[in-house]
Amino acid sequence: MARTGLRPPSALRLRANRPDKATKTEKAGKTAKADKSANASKATKATKSGKTGKTAKAERGSRSTRSKRHSVPFPLRLLAMLCAFAVMVAFAVVLARLTLEPSPASEALTHTNMRPGRSLRAYLDQPALRDAVKQIGGNLLLGVPFGVLVPVVAPRTRGILRVLLLTATVMLLVEFAQGALITGRAFDIDDVILNTTGALVGYLLLGRRMSRAVHS
């Protein structure tokens, strides 16, 4: 009789267990690779964060050194603010004398103007150019000190819009007082426009630089 090739069950078990061991080994290798890649990414992130932190510290240090270099000492800043305030008070006195003094002689000639540009056209239509320059230039000059001094006296008013808004508000109050209380004076919206334009010119030419020099 021919012998059948029967193998012992232990050999079968060994062969059956070998694929499981190979699979476990592959899984362990993959896990180790994943751990290595994760550790490498963490190290890269840590390096980047360290660099960004150093860069931020360096920028802060450079900003602080710049501010220390360009900052004005407090006594000089206070002196500049007091001088600007004194000039502002003197200007307010001059403004009051020019705009709030009664003028009975011109009572018949004054009229209220609520239309922007109406008085400007009247100034330009005058036969003497000197009169037009006097009227327009005088109103422009009245607004220049606002743009130059206000940002120095009050740092919170720095900025074109704030300076213009403050100047327009003050000049509107002056014009309302002229029209309601002063004899020979009248409200004129063109005066407010010219005064505000003068404040804009003063701020762009000197006020912005002076406020930065004093308060930076």
Image (cartoon, rainbow, N blue to C red):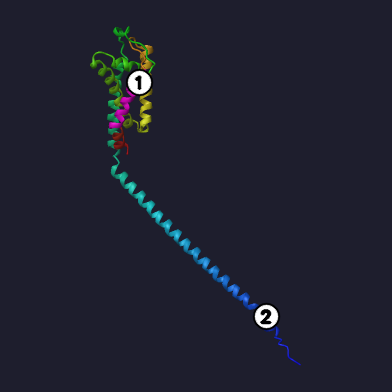
- The location of residue 81, given as percent across then percent down, is 30, 32
> Which element is circle 2 on?
helix
Instruction: Name the mark on residue 192.
Output: 1
Which of the 4 quarters of the picture holds residue 155?
top left
The residue wearing badge 2 is 13
> How many numbered marks are there?
2
Q: Nearer the viewer, residue 117 or 25?
A: 117
What amino acid type is highlighted by mark number 2?
Arg
Residue at 25% across, 15% down: 131
CA distance separating discs 2 and 1: 104 Å
Residue at 62% across, 76% down: 19
Disc number lying in front (2 or 1): 2
- In the rendered image, residue 196 lying in the magenta stretch gets the answer yes
Q: Earlier in the sequence, mark 2 or mark 1?
A: 2
Q: Residues within 10 Å of mark 1 (few under 14, many from 20)?
A: many
Q: Is residue 154 above or below residue 37?
A: above
Which of the 4 quarters of the picture holds residue 23?
bottom right
Query: Magenta: predominant secondary structure element?
Result: helix
Residue at 37% across, 53% down: 55
Q: Which residues are magenta?
A: 189-206
Q: Nearer the viewer, residue 201 or 142?
A: 201
What amino acid type is highlighted by mark number 1?
Val
Q: In the rendered view of the protein, which quadrant contains the N terminus?
A: bottom right
Q: Is residue 25 above or below residue 178?
A: below
Q: Residues within 10 Å of mark 2 (few under 14, many from 20)?
A: few
Q: Which residue is at the far bottom?
A: 1
Taking the image as drawn, is residue 148 in sight?
no
- The location of residue 185, given as percent across then percent down, is 33, 12
- The location of residue 179, given as percent across then percent down, is 37, 13
Which of the 4 quarters of the picture holds residue 90?
top left
